[in-house]
Image (spheres, helix red, strand yellow):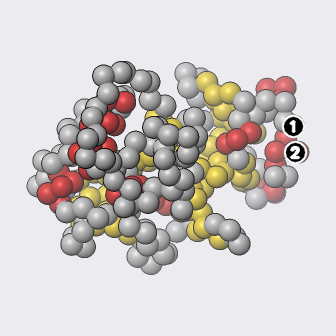
Amino acid sequence: MTIVEDTQEELWSAKDMLDVKLFDKDDDSFGTVEDLLFDDDHWTVRYLVVKSGPVFKRSQVLVSPFLLNNPEFTSFNPAIHTQLTKEQLSSCPPLEEHKPISRRYEEELAGHFTYPSYWAGPLLWGTVSFPVPHNAVPDNYEISGEIEKTHLRSINEIIGYQVSCSNDEELGTVEDFFIDTETWEIVNLVVYTGEWFDGGMFSISPQLITGISWQDRLIDFGNTDRAAIESR
């Protein structure tokens, strides 16, 4: 379990979150985390993709950080706890697997679990800066008729993307992500260089990204040279 601590924040490795068990309100296991979905506008994790057990109605459930208690990530017993019962989790709107997540589905999910929309407001989580559990949607919450494009991406998809900088110099491939435990922001990408003599890896903020080609599986850091990137 990779946990990075400094004076201001504690960061989790995204890869280490995969296969971690999700426990319901009664401390019973509901399923395991098999992916994380983040939005590529703010580089913030919006959902845990949880694979549930065979006895439940839904094989996959999207769980917002709004629904989580403080996760317990230790090297011996990693676990994530939700405020919901098994019945609440398994009765969520059905997720069409292998299809893009629509904004309308996100609205249905928010309405079902009564948490605010992260896209409806000026702050990182809509009207709040953190996904605080008690911030519920108002009683008169309605699903809008407008269709808005989502910007959700899979952590599993991005791992392995090529990373380049100025003059098309290849730096390596995306190996992992470090996530702020409080805001769920992706603070750093971990890049694997394959060069054993310098440790083989370095981290870099996604805020320095100048472009992404989803088709070519390429992340570009523009005119920043390699030495400047690796020294950050």
Camera-side residue of 159 and 86: 86
Q: Is residue 12 above or below residue 104?
A: below
Q: Which residue is mark 2?
A: 228
**Residue 147 image position (x, y, % from top left):** 37, 21
Q: Secondary structure at mark 2?
A: helix
Residue drawn at x 34%, y 67% as measured from the top left: 81
Under circle 1, the secondary element is: loop
**Whether residue 129 is situated above or below residue 10 in the rendered picture:** above
Q: Residue at x 67, y 42 (%)?
A: 206
How many neighbours does mark 1 have within 10 angstroms: few (below 14), some (14-19), or many (20 or more)? some
Residue ID for mark 1: 225
Q: Looking at this rendering, what residue extends furthest in the bottom direction?
A: 76
- Which quadrant of the view contains residue 12? bottom right
- Identity of the residue drawn at 31% across and 44% down: 110
**Residue 79, x across and y down, in percent:** 38, 69
Amino acid type shown at disc 1: Asp
The reply to whether residue 97 is in sight is no
From the viewer's perspective, is 41 left or right of 196? left
- Position of 70 compared to 165: left or right? left
Question: Answer yes or no: do the residues labelled 1 and 2 have beta carbons within 8 Å?
Answer: yes
State whether residue 228 appears in this view. yes
Return the residue nearer the eye: 229 or 170: 229
At which x and y percent is residue 121? 50, 40
Up-down relation of residue 179 to residue 83 (above or below): above
Q: Amino acid at mark 2?
A: Ala
- The image quadrant of residue 101 is top left
